[in-house]
Amino acid sequence: MQFRLLLVVILALAAGCASVPRGGYYQDDGPHRRPEVDVSKVPDAVPRNEPHNERNNRPYTVFGVSYRPLNTAKGYRERGVASWYGKKFHGQYTANGETYDMYAMTAAHKTLPLPSYLRVRNLNNGKSVVVRVNDRGPFRENRIVDLSYAAAAKLGIIGTGTGIVEVEALSGDEPVTQVTARAPEPEPLPQASAPRLYLQVGAFTSRDNAENLKLRLVRADLKSVHIQSADLDTTPLYRVRIGPLDNVDESDRLAARVAAQGLSNPIVVVEQ
């Protein structure tokens, strides 16, 4: 296991008796008091084809959860919660053996091949960046990507510690604008409404099972519980969700309350 994974475990154990870390980073992490670099001038990563070292993409286990990296990043696209990590890991080794630079445009992901490239878009303000994935994480529930300080700053999520984002894999085969050395912007996402955040507690093909779970949550005094119907191919699917929620902190609090009911793995769902 690489150094950063070990350090994450040590930090988590040390913080076990403390309060929940603020935002997207541990209490003794975060930005430098006086940033060493003007991040507004840091260019995006430029996607290029790089070989995937087999050693960097083996299955691994953290906090008792096993992860199996994907064979390819092609077609990967997801919406969810981004966090970021800073000075605590600055200068330490990343999972693929490089040195973590909080002022570079990089990121950590649990299962994408190392290295990979992602476009990350803040769904609240429309800002986007391109990052190179060279690390593993985040290992906190309901976080899909861990950004460097520079990437988080350019997306405008330093103060909150987290952001609601869409991430999309890029490849070196895609054209790059030579003047700006940036990957081309995709078609803009609809801006008719702000992203809506839900906590999904379960999904069933049986309506009765969904209703039973909803009743259990209501009896536990959880509010705004509803069932969303959908079709998975030709099979009906009933999703039990709580929300919409005001922010990521509320989703974290609700996830803890759901877990206290003996229900595991509620997931954050983002809709727009």
Image: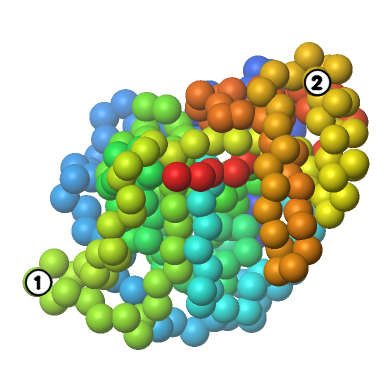
> Residue under circle 1?
179
**Residue 212 appears left or right of 62:** right
Q: Is residue 110 above or below residue 265?
A: below
Residue 218 is labelled as 2
Residue found at x 74% / y 19%: 222
| Residue 253 pos. (x, y %) | 66, 22
Q: Residues within 10 Å of mark 2 (few under 14, many from 20)?
A: some
Question: Which corner quadrant of the image does residue 158 belong to?
Answer: top left
Q: Is residue 134 left or right of residue 204?
A: left
Question: Does residue 200 appear to the left or right of 269 in the view shown?
Answer: right
Marks 1 and 2 close (CB-CB < 8 Å)? no
Between 60 and 32, the residue placed more toward the observer is 60
Identify the image quadrant of residue 175: bottom left
Q: Position of residue 99 (x, y in %)?
A: 45, 59
Q: Earlier in the sequence, mark 1 or mark 2?
A: 1
Q: Nearer the viewer, residue 109 or 36?
A: 109
Left or right of 200 in this view: 194: left
Q: Disc 1 on helix, strand or loop? A: loop
Q: Amino acid at mark 2?
A: Val
| Quadrant housing the C terminus | top left
**Residue 88 visible in the displayed image:** no
Q: Secondary structure at mark 2?
A: helix
Residue drawn at 32 percent across, 81 percent down: 174
Does residue 212 show up?
Answer: yes
Q: Nearer the viewer, residue 121 or 57?
A: 121
